[in-house]
């Protein structure tokens, strides 16, 4: 690999991207890895609200700076989205003014610094992790707490207004095709990269697995909603044990799972345990009722799991529809689970998955970013 200190980039992350244990920070961390592999020197700036300093990041980055994220509620008097106002830092701005190198802003979360006239916007690139306004409005529609619903609605309205900052960026990198198409119709310099992920190749077991699996961050409302859907619509007709695995399930969700036969909860598995659960399952059942972005759990499943059953919002616009089974209603879900349970996963199925052209590729994705941020780059002979 050709190393060049001439290619230097500032990456501003909405959170400390290690451990890489949930969707947003997985995308950030794997992008740092990809840039590092290409010989790019990285200065990482990250907002911390509980993770603390992580020495592992120094293996990828020339320098790592940490900034305390402000309380969300301090931004109530601002016109900015609360999670944007909470990530303003004069020290960060001062450090970025010390050179003229490109700045990659992770999410709208970190893009308030573009409002500072001293920052040359031609240096600024934004990685979109979601269609945030749509995402927050969807959260509001599903929230039972009136004050949380009010917060989500307020953020959605402010995000719709703040989103116009995308017009000022030198480039915007989207995580999904539908969002690339939507924003390209409104703004310039919108480019698709897809998600960055941890997998260099597929590691899928043939034969039959031992159970049916759903997994995700169970503290997130959309994932709890998916689990409750499976409990209501699938648990009474399971051909085998249903395992629910993920972080921080609420007491209410734990009680709901405990009341179901043939359903087992695995709370807070570490990364090695979670990967083993994915690889040992016969069927991965992954519905979602939140259609924005792309779910990295789907990418994990495609690289490591056997049969995958999803609903349309999980797979829409990915180009991966022919690698999964789509079940959009309870009857179809029960039928497809039964069929997948009875079907061995073959070498031919593994080969078809491995060769699929729409599987996200970190090397292709980082090339899009580098061509935009560093207009002249040497050929990547190491590939």
Image (spheres, rainbow, N blue to C red):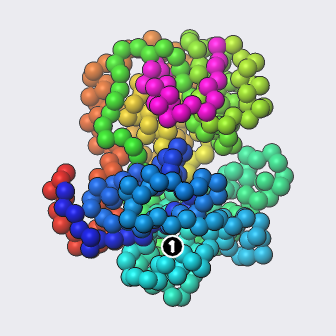
Q: Is residue 100 above or below residue 262?
A: below
Q: Is residue 253 above or below residue 379?
A: above
Q: Nearer the viewer, residue 10 or 139?
A: 10
**Residue 312 in the image, given as x and y percentages of width and height:** 52, 39
Q: Residue furthest right?
A: 146
In the rendered image, residue 352, in percent from the top left (x then y), is placed at 28, 30
In percent of width and height, residue 265 lies at 64, 24
Position of residue 191 relative to residue 357, above or below, is: below
Nearer the observer, 264 or 97: 97
Q: Quadrant of residue 78?
A: bottom right
Left or right position of 330 against 35: right
Q: Is residue 241 left or right of residue 29?
A: right
Magenta stretch?
262-283
Please identify the residue farthest to the front as the structure is shown. Answer: 55
- Residue 165 in view in this figure: no
Q: Quadrant of residue 244?
A: top right
Magenta stretch contains residue 273: yes
Q: In this image, 191 relative to 253: left or right?
A: left
User: For mark 1, what is the residue?
Assistant: 166
Q: Secondary structure at mark 1?
A: helix
Q: Identify the residue at horizontal 62%, vertical 69% (top origin).
A: 87
Q: Is residue 37 magenta?
A: no
Which residue is located at x 34 percent, y 19 percent? 206
Q: Position of residue 76 (x, y in %)?
A: 77, 71
Q: Residue at x 53, y 28 (%)?
A: 285
Quadrant the N terminus occupies: bottom left
Q: Nearer the viewer, residue 140 or 33?
A: 33
- Looking at the rendered structure, the number of numbered marks drawn on it comes to 1
């Amino acid at each position: 690999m050709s190393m060049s200190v001439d290619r230097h980039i500032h990456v501003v992350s909405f959170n400390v991207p290690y451990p890489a244990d949930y969707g947003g920070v997985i995308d950030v961390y794997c992008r740092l890895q990809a840039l590092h592999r290409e010989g790019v020197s990285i200065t990482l700036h990250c907002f911390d609200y509980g993770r603390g300093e992580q020495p592992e990041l120094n293996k990828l980055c020339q320098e790592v700076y940490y900034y305390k994220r402000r309380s969300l509620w301090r931004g109530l008097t601002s016109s900015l989205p609360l999670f944007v106002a909470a990530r303003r830092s004069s020290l960060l701005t001062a450090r970025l003014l010390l050179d003229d190198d490109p700045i990659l802003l992770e999410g709208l979360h970190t893009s308030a610094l573009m409002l500072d006239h001293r920052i040359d916007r031609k240096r600024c690139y934004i990685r979109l992790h979601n269609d945030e306004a749509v995402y927050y409005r969807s959260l509001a529609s599903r929230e039972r707490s009136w004050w949380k619903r009010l917060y989500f609605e307020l953020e959605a309205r402010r995000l719709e207004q703040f989103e116009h900052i995308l017009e000022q960026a030198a480039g915007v990198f989207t995580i999904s095709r539908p969002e690339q198409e939507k924003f390209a119709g409104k703004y310039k310099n919108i480019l698709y990269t897809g998600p960055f992920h941890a997998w260099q190749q597929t590691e899928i077991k043939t034969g039959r697995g031992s159970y049916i699996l759903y997994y995700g961050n169970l503290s997130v409302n959309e994932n709890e909603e998916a689990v409750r859907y499976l409990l209501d619509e699938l648990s009474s007709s399971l051909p085998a044990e249903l395992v629910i695995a993920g972080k921080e399930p609420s007491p209410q969700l734990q009680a709901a799972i405990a009341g179901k036969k043939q359903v087992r909860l695995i709370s807070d598995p570490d990364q090695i345990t979670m990967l083993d659960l994915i690889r040992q399952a016969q069927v991965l059942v992954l519905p979602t009722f939140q259609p924005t972005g792309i779910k990295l759990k789907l990418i994990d499943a495609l690289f490591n799991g056997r049969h995958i059953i999803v609903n349309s919002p999980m797979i829409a616009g990915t180009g991966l529809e022919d690698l999964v089974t789509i079940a959009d209603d309870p009857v179809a879900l029960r039928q497809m689970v039964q069929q997948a349970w009875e079907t061995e996963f073959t070498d031919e199925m593994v080969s078809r998955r491995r060769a699929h052209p729409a599987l996200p590729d970190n090397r292709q994705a980082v090339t899009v970013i580098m061509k935009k941020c560093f207009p002249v780059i040497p050929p990547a002979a190491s590939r």
